[in-house]
């Protein structure tokens, strides 16, 4: 692997890990439920991207599939939480 690419992927992993930690902090401390949902949304995006960058660095396709599962689960979770906050129920 090229040294410049390796360095860029390392910095990307560090930045995404910091973003995930800040999102977890927003989930824990958020003053309203809407802030917590946005923190959860940012957390799953940061985690998904962290899996993709790690998969690029390790050159393994397994982590790309795991990132896809995280993306699908995060989308379903965000939609269901948004519907719950709007109507007070998920299933009508």
Image (cartoon, grey):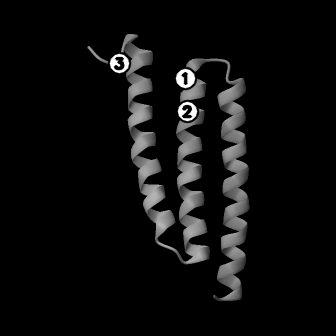
For this orientation, the residue located farthest to the front is 62
Q: Quadrant of residue 68?
A: bottom left
Viewer-nearest of labels 3 and 1? 3
Residue in view at x 72 percent, y 34 percent = 25
User: Residue 72's x, y, as percent?
Assistant: 39, 46
Give yes or no for contact between labels 3 and 1 (Cβ–Cβ under 8 Å).
no
Q: Between residues 36 and 69, which one lies in front from this camera angle? A: 69
Residue 82: numbered disc? none
At label 2, counting other C-alpha atoms closer than 10 Å, the crowd grade (few under 14, some 14-19, many 20 or more) is some
Q: Nearer the viewer, residue 64 or 17?
A: 64
Figure quadrant of residue 54: bottom right
Which residue occupies the foreground of this view, 13 or 35? 13
Asked whether, in this view, residue 47 is left or right of residue 25, the answer is left
* Sequence-first tag of 3 and 1: 1
Asked whether, in this view, residue 51 is left or right of residue 17, the answer is left
Classify residue 31 as left or right of residue 85: right
Q: Which residue is mark 3?
A: 90
Mark 1: few, some, or many residues within 10 Å (few <14, many ≥20)? some
Classify mark 3: helix, strand or loop.
loop
Query: Is label 3 in contact with label 2 (beta carbons under 8 Å)?
Result: no
- Quadrant, the C terminus: top left
Residue identifier under label 2: 38
Q: Which residue is mark 1?
A: 34
Residue 47 spot, x, y in % from top left: 58, 51
Q: CA distance from mark 3 to mark 1?
A: 16 Å
Return the x and y of residue 60 as percentages of the image width and height.
52, 74
Q: Quadrant of the N terminus?
A: bottom right
Quarter of the image where one finds residue 42: top right
Residue farthest toward the left in the current orientation of the protein: 92
Vertically, is 17 above or below 61? above
């Amino acid at each position: 692997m090229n040294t410049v690419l390796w360095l860029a992927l390392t910095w990307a992993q560090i930045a995404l890990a910091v973003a995930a930690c800040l999102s977890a902090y927003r989930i824990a401390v958020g003053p309203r439920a809407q802030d917590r949902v946005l923190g959860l949304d940012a957390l799953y995006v940061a985690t998904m991207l962290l899996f993709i960058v790690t998969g690029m660095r390790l050159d393994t396709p397994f982590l790309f599939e795991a990132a896809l599962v995280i993306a699908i689960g995060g989308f379903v979770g965000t939609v269901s939480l948004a519907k719950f906050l709007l109507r007070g129920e998920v299933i009508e």
